[in-house]
Image (cartoon, rainbow, N blue to C red):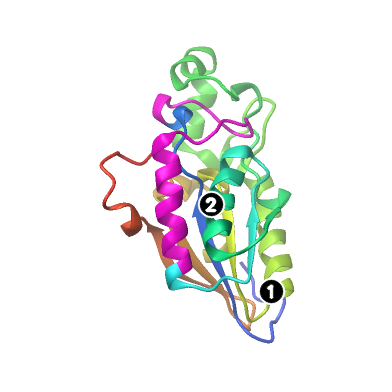
Amino acid sequence: MSETNQPHLEAPCTFILVRHGETASNVTNTFRGRTDVPLNEAGRAQAEALAKRIASEWQPNALYTSPVYRAIQTALTIGKHSGLAVTPYPGIIDIDFGAWTGLPFDEVKRRWPDELDLWIRHPGQTRIPGGEMLVDMRIRAQQSLRELAKRHTGQTIVLVGHTVINRVIIMEAMDIPDDHFWYIGQDTCALNLIRAEVNGNYSLLLLNDTCHLLSNTHKTR
């Protein structure tokens, strides 16, 4: 990421980037993408724990969410505890998994073995059948970070996203190559902290932080 084309801010903007809570599709290892699956019981408990932590440690000024239902549910819980209205923001919607959407991992492996193998080994080079490439997502991640940092200079805002878009946002902020996608952890209801600096660069302050979920006995996915 070059500093040259980055907007210079009057004051840093801090992003609290979180992933939505657990769903049944997380448990069954299904390609969710933009399908509107709801949080399960564990996911709702995760969202409560996350929301309480955000309210106790920060005073966010705005709350944006992917327009997908599981993210909206998580955002509504955060908004309830922080006294914020929820604003859907299409720039942080989940990946379009195209023909894989809604299918279990094993079925995708049977029907598209070569494409799935490439997605696992070289995600940055993979064109999902009928779907997006990471480079496509990276463009909208870049645009979203720039637009929101400029809109909320000097403020702290919450972004509720998904494992794929969150990883892409982090890769864009830290100038990490697309093929390192799998090296970034994003558990359900994990919290990341990214600061947009006044010089147009970004600082990663927290990554995949789930300490607010330590009292839960379930495994996050």
The amino acid beneath tag 2 is: Thr
In which quadrant will I find the N terminus?
bottom right
Percent position (x, y) of residue 131? 67, 31
Determine whether, in the image, residue 41 is placed left or right of residue 16: left
Is label 1 in contact with label 2 (beta carbons under 8 Å)?
Answer: no
Determine whether, in the image, residue 142 is placed left or right of residue 52: right
Q: Which region is colored magenta?
A: 27-55
Q: Residue at x 40, y 49 (%)?
A: 183
Percent position (x, y) of residue 170? 52, 59
Determine whether, in the image, residue 64 is placed left or right of residue 14: right
Percent position (x, y) of residue 78? 53, 56
Q: Residue at x 39, y 38 (%)?
A: 42
Determine whether, in the image, residue 71 is placed left or right of residue 188: right
Q: Is disc 1 surrounded by few (<14), some (14 to 19) or many (20+) residues within 10 Å? A: some
Q: Residue at x 48, y 73 (%)?
A: 58
Residue placed most toward the observer, 126 or 104 = 104
Would you name the residue on which mark 1 appears? 152
Q: Residue at x 74, y 72 (%)?
A: 151
Above or below 151: residue 100 = above
Look at the image and say whether residue 97 sits in the magenta stretch: no
Would you name the residue on which mark 2 appears? 77
In which quadrant will I find the C terminus?
top left
Name the front one of labels 1 and 2.
2
Element class at badge 1: loop
Element class at badge 2: helix
